[in-house]
Image (cartoon, rainbow, N blue to C red):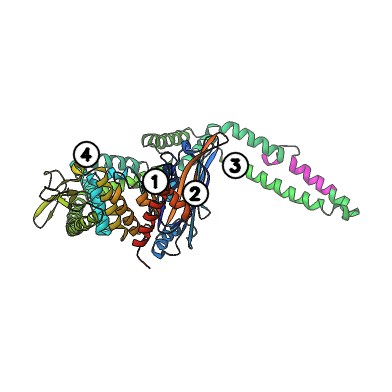
Amino acid sequence: MLIKLKIQNYALLKDVEIDFGPGLNVLTGETGAGKSILIGAINTAIGERGYIENIRTGEDKAVVEAVFDFSSNAAAMAAVNSLLSGAGIDSADPLLIIHREISRNSKGRILINNSSAALSFLEKLGKGLVDIHGQHEHQSLLRSEVHMDLLDSYAGCRDIKSKTASLYHKYNVIMTELKQLRSMENEKAERLDILNYRLNELEAASLDRENELEELNARRSVMVHAESVRESVVKTITMLSPSSLDLEGDGAIDLLYRAKQNMEDVAKIDANSLSQVLPLAADASVKLEEIREFFVSYRDKIDFDPQMLSAAEERISLIESLMKKYKKSGVAELKRFYSTLADEKKAVEFNSEAIIEKEKLAVKCMEELAVAAGELSAVRHLKAKELGLKIEEELKDLGIMKASFLVEVIDTPAAGPDALSVTINSKKYGVNESGINDAAFMLSLNPGEDMKPLVKIASGGEISRIMLSIKNILSAVDPIPVMVFDEIDTGISGKIAQVVGKKLREISSMKQLLCITHLPQIAACSDTHYSVGKHVAAGKTETRIEKLDKTAKVREVAKLLSGETVTEASMRAAEELISSVNNDRPQE
């Protein structure tokens, strides 16, 4: 359950810390006091987008921290820890701490058990932590697409629904690929001509060595500058050893040789001083000789041949033209391109066989889709009747005594020859990722009246009670540990409000509830009661939230009964209302 909520500089909430209890937590206060801001803060903590506009005026950042305790809910803890483990975050053992910051000047920050997390992960995690039923969700019950989701939640058909959706998408992928293959078959001859031309062109180029272009460019550079290179090489050899070119005079090698002889003469007299220098001179002499030999050999290889230069330039031109034509950066990429073309040619040549195999896959996938969609439809039809009867019973408990409620499952007819359809028991149905059904909630408020769509006959108060009925039914199978009701009391009052309060308390025996209300009958049912109010401090408005003791709770309920002015009569009425609720509470 949610045991603690810390809020700083979020809208009117300057610095608030709330300790929530198990069971039914009720928040009351005048309109505009900031009760719905609290719901916004909870939404922020569980992954809703954070808006800079929610930061308190004059502050740089808002902080929301939520602490959940799973010590008494092993199933919820296992589900949460599975997600945390996959993200590399410390497990909830048993506490889960979510810290969220929204900043004006930088990117916000999310910490889950002291580990950084992405908003997308927090949103995924939050869906399994808190189910918030806000004021706008009353109206969502009027949308038919919501009806199917609620039925499926009750029916517990998540796995078969997921399988149906997966097969539907798989079939569409297969058909897209099949369309491409058939298009290739129609263009087969033309495509093969193009592929063969390109393959032949690349084969004729004999692109064997990946570094060939670099080698050719280096060779061409030497040939183009052959004369200047030869001249520099001859000068180098002359400076090293003129005798190598049958010239007179001393070069560096000769001079070093004579210098080394003089050093040896000195060493005969002072060996210690020259012990380290003589080896250096000997080494230098050897290295100079190796350099001379290299350049003598290199000089012999320098040969300007116009035909060789022309051949190299033609080869370079061929390779570069292929690179430009096929938009490749070198011989290596051209070779890989050749392999790709060869693979494509093979695929095109065997395209007919690929079409046959793909058609077999499509038939098999469609058969599996028909089976899955049929199973899903059967579960929906079975559970729809059961859910309708349960909602009827719940509505009676909530004061709609003569209502008849029907969850109608409508099989989707095949739309036409081009629309996707499945055949189940020799009958065709239109199919989509949700299966072959639509659902509609139908209601009759009085005996003898026809069932009509919920949207056409239900009032605001009836919508609230129907939603509460469904939430109560689903709470037994829904693993989410915390439910939030933001003004579930819309459109109800009096005795019905008292019944709704008892129903909320009934749900709260299975999971923790947070409920915002204006009705004393609901507030009286609370296990823990909070008062929300606005105050002005230092010229700025802020919302404060106070946890009420028994006496303060009586006074708050009395205010809801009589208005701002609390009388002795309203206090007695509040005490009696709270007492009656406690007397009705089941003994544990």
Identify the residue at horizontal 31%, vertical 50% (top origin).
497
Q: Amino acid at mark 2?
A: Glu
- Judged by depth in the image, the label closer to the viewer, 3 or 1, is 1
Which stretch appears magenta? 241-262
Residue to which mark 2 is pinned: 546
Q: Amino acid at mark 3?
A: Tyr
Which quadrant of the rendered structure holds the C terminus?
bottom left
Dot 4: within a 10 Å radius of its alpha carbon, few (fewer than 14), some, or many (20 or more) residues? few
Dot 3: within a 10 Å radius of its alpha carbon, few (fewer than 14), some, or many (20 or more) residues? few
Residue to which mark 3 is pinned: 298
Element at label 4: helix
Between 76 and 235, the one lying in front of the other is: 76
Q: Amino acid at mark 4?
A: Glu
Would you say residue 397 is visible in this rendering? yes
| Left or right: where 484 falls relative to 226 | left
> Real-space Cα distance between discs 4 and 2?
80 Å
> Real-space Cα distance between discs 4 and 1?
83 Å
